Image (cartoon, grey):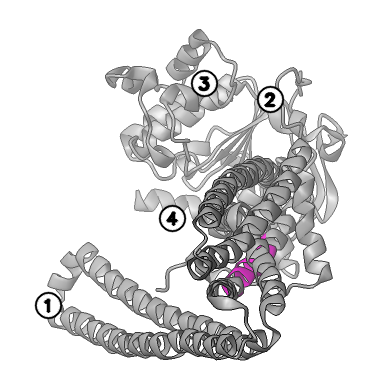
Amino acid sequence: MARFQENDLPKAKLDSNSLQKALRIFKYAKNHKWKFFVGLVFLLLTSATALAFPKLMGMLVDCVTNKDLNKANEIALALMGILTLQAIFSFFRISLFVNFTENSLSNIRFALYENLVKLPMSFYSQKRVGELNSRISADISQLQDTFTTTIAEFLRQFILIIGGFVILGSISPKLTLMMLAIVPVVAVAAVIFGRFIRKYGKKTQDKVAESQVIVEETLQGISNVKAFANEWYELERYKNKIKEIVKIAIKGGQYRGYFASFIILCLFGCVVAVVWYGITLTIKGEVQGVGDLISFVLYTTFIGASFGGIAEMYAQIQKAVGATERVFELLEETPEEINANKKGVILEKIKGNVTFKNVAFSYPSRKEIEVLKDVNFSADFGQKIALVGPSGAGKSTISSLLLRFYDITSGEILVDGKSIYDYDLENLRGNMSIVPQDVILFGGTIRENIAYGKPDATDEEIFLAAKQANALNFVEGFPEKFETLVGERGVKLSGGQRQRIAIARALLKNPSILILDEATSSLDSESEKLVQEALEVLMEGRTSIIIAHRLSTIRKADKILVLDNGKITEEGTHQELMNLENGIYKNLSNLQFSNS
């Protein structure tokens, strides 16, 4: 199991089109753009002071030959001045780039999250949450690193290389040509070699991660290991993996040894060669004094280091451009028309008459499979309509379509005689509530989770909703009562407790249309009784659509619809359907009650 790292981010090809796309990031800088451009000015000043340093060092060394102490003092002061300026320029450069980046990325993060929250369910049915998380974390982190340091460093190294060559050419064209023939080549070779070694190191890390997975799996499933007496098998599996780690790590060590030898021989050999040739030219009088030679060696070191760093930075910029493209792909997805700021929006109350007319539907990801075919039914205000049928018959799809999670293929769905597509989306969903089988609570307090149905609810309203949902007893039993933290996804509460919190949430919302999606199917008898009582209170005075597996919970429904293979095959009350000879409902009912 290879671990995902930011280093594994794919690179984008750098061309005018990809760079143009990447520059859209400036749109999100808003009124912070100036910081980037002022930062660039400080970057140029930092590079200029850096280029002046070797020249002044050479002049300082020349003072030894000339025995000019006053000049040496002046140059030493100038050098200190240059270093002070460089420190000041670097401070402003880094501060401005960080300020620009953080403000821009905070705008991008929010825009990305806002768009993700507003995207339709059809988008989420085709995307993995982990992949979307990666966009917000790994891709944005890549942009952060690139805009904070990499671009600035890349430009600085580029200026140092160009400026360095210009100054070297003015000192000695011959020495420059000789240096140009060897130093950049060796520096680039060192980068390629270094990258190859890092890849090898990553292979070792991946194998170690795989061995950790074996340990984790074995210890988590230790009861199975012992029950099957398979300790020998697990030991063998782990031993083989460890052997692979050793093999790769030893080979990686050998390559690191070669790399160290390469650096000592080639890189330092280059310095020796340049110094030797420089001394030869100085003796011949083609290079003016030892100071110029020292300056030349320092500029050569600068250029060599810059060549080494610039290749890595170019790869980082490629990754950042790729990250920008992936982030903008999500930002360009078309969101649902939702008013994100709910405050001040007054919901128009819906009565709750629901009609499905010749509704057909296929999921966007599986267009060839028709999930619903010519579905017709109506639910009047206050009625309890139950949907039953085998798994995959399309029961939950009906609730998803009513909530407008997906668009129907054909037919129409009416609420109070008006197409659901003519309603404001927020208004439509604001009049509906769903109590699902698997309730997911948010990781805050019980109060916050109940208030999710009505964020501006008073303490009295929350208390009453909890009481009506049969949740008050267990909430009052906790030391922190309503301030009790429910844990991630509500893990600190039992299934029945989570279900009653969800019912309290729905009660607080006071919907006109209620959808119960197998709300009691995974509960024990005692919890089911308490939840069922709470559901009876919840269903009073509103249209309820109940999706059920346990037929005992829907005997009192006003109408039961039997779905089979996407079609409504039977319709009627419990008694009417029980009277149908060889009916699906009758068979399901007999099967359940004979097993209970």
Q: Secondary structure at mark 3?
A: helix
Residue that protrudes farthest toward the top in the picture: 460
Q: Residues in magenta? A: 311-323
Q: Secondary structure at mark 4?
A: helix
- Residue 55: x and y in percent read 60, 65
**Residue 91 falls in image quadrant:** top right
Please, what is the three-letter code of the amino acid marked with disc 1?
Answer: Ala
Question: Is 510 one of the magenta-colored residues?
Answer: no
Density class for disc 4 (Cα within 10 Å; few <14, some 14-19, many ≥20) is: few
Please, what is the three-letter code of the amino acid marked with disc 3?
Answer: Val
Q: Between residues 106 and 541, which one lies in front from this camera angle?
A: 106
Of labels 2 and 3, the one closer to you: 2
The residue indicated by pointer 1 is 229
Nearest to N terminus: mark 2 or mark 3 = 2
The residue indicated by pointer 2 is 512
**With 531 as the anchor, is 113 left or right in this view?**
right
Distance from disc 4 to disc 3, alpha carbons, whole Å, reads: 29 Å
Q: Mark 1 and mark 3 in contact? Answer it, CB < 8 Å.
A: no
Label ID, residue 326:
none
The residue indicated by pointer 4 is 591
The residue under the point 40% across, 83% down is 200
Distance from disc 2 to disc 1, alpha carbons, whole Å, reads: 59 Å
Q: Secondary structure at mark 1?
A: loop
Distance from disc 2 to disc 3, alpha carbons, whole Å, reads: 14 Å
Question: Is 312 one of the magenta-colored residues?
Answer: yes
Which quarter of the figure is the N terminus placed in? bottom left
